Amino acid sequence: MISFEYPLNEKNRGYLRFEFLFLQIRKSINLTNESDPIAFFKALFELVELSERADMRHDLIKDLEVLSEQMSGWLECKQVDYDAVRELIAEIEQLNKAVFSMPKQLHFFKNNRFLTSLKQRFSIPSGCCNFDLPQFYYWSAGDLSKRQQDVQKWFSYFENLEKALCLFLKIKRSQGIFSEQIAVNGFYHGETEHSGFITVKVKKEQAVYPMISGHKNRFSIRFINAKDPNNSAFDVPFQQLIW
C-alpha cells in the first residue's frame, strides 16, 4: 500500500520535514553513488538552516516531556514492563538535554570555512558546477574513507536531534487510532481531538492519491484519479491512522 502522511499544524509539519531530511542524509551518507555527495550536502545545509529555528527544538523538548509524563503514569499499571518504561523515560531525559545544547554545537557550521563556502553556492540554482565549487570537487576526488569520516563527523552534530525526533514520531505513530473508511465519490470529512497527524493508505492498483487539508480538529480528503485528474474519483476505500 502507498502511505500518505499529513500534519495538522505547522509544528508537526516541521517535524515531518526534519524526518524527511534525515532520511535523505541516511540514504546518501555512505557516498557510494556519484550523486550522493551533492544529495548529502543539499540535505545537510537545509538541516542546518531549519535547525537554527529555536522554536522547533523547544517544541520537541516540550512534546517529549509530555510523553515522559504519560509514561510515568504507565508505571501504575500492573501489566506494564516497568524496566522498559523507566529506560524509555531515562532516554527521553538524556535526549532532551542533548537537543537543548544544540545551539552551541551549530556554531561549528558557521565557523567551518569549507562548509560555509559550499552552503552559499548550494542555495543557488545550478550553483554546484565545478567552476563554482572547485574546493568541493577537489574534496570529492579524495580518498573515500576520508570523505566518509568527514560526513559522519558533520552529521554527528545532528544525531541526537535525529534520535529525539524519530523516537517521538515512533511513539506517536504507535499510539495512533486505526480505522477503515470509504470516501464517497472520492470525498471524506473527518474530525479528531488531541491529534497532530493523519496517515492515509491506499492500494497502488486503486490508482488514486489523496489531497488532504485540515487544521487542529478537522480535516478533509479528496482522492484524485491518477489516470484522469480531471474526473472525480469513484468511491475509495482506504485505511486511516489518526495519531
Image (cartoon, grey):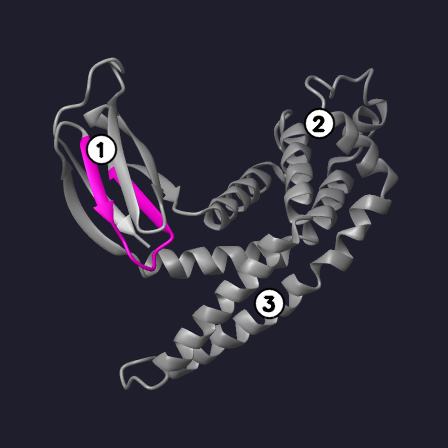
Residue type at tag 2 = Ser
Residue 220 left/right relative to 5: left
Report if residue 210 is visible in the image.
yes
Q: x, y percentage for residue 59?
A: 55, 59
| The C terminus - image quarter | bottom left
Residue type at tag 3 = Asn
The mark lying in front, picked from 1 and 3, is 3
Residue 194 left/right relative to 30: left
Q: Main secondary structure of the magenta part?
A: strand
User: Over which residues does the magenta segment extend?
Assistant: 187-201
Q: CA distance from mark 2 to mark 1?
A: 37 Å
Residue 198 on the magenta segment: yes
- Depth check, front residue: 100 or 127: 100
- For residue 58, what is the image quadrant? bottom right
Q: x, y percentage for residue 133?
A: 81, 23
Residue picked out by circle 2: 123
Residue 179 left/right relative to 169: left
Q: x, y percentage for residue 30?
A: 63, 39
Label 2, residues with CA under 10 Å away: few <14, some 14-19, many ≥20 = few
Q: CA distance from mark 1 to mark 3?
A: 38 Å
Q: Is residue 206 above or below residue 94?
A: above
Residue 241 left/right relative to 37: left
Residue picked out by circle 1: 203
Say which residue appears at 46% left-offset and 70% top-offset: 66
Do the residues bearing badges 2 and 1 touch, measured as CB atoms within 8 Å?
A: no
Residue 161 on the magenta segment: no
Q: Is residue 83 above or below residue 171?
A: below
Say which residue appears at 24% left-offset and 28% top-offset: 223
Sequence-wise, the earlier of marks 2 and 1 is 2
Residue picked out by circle 3: 96
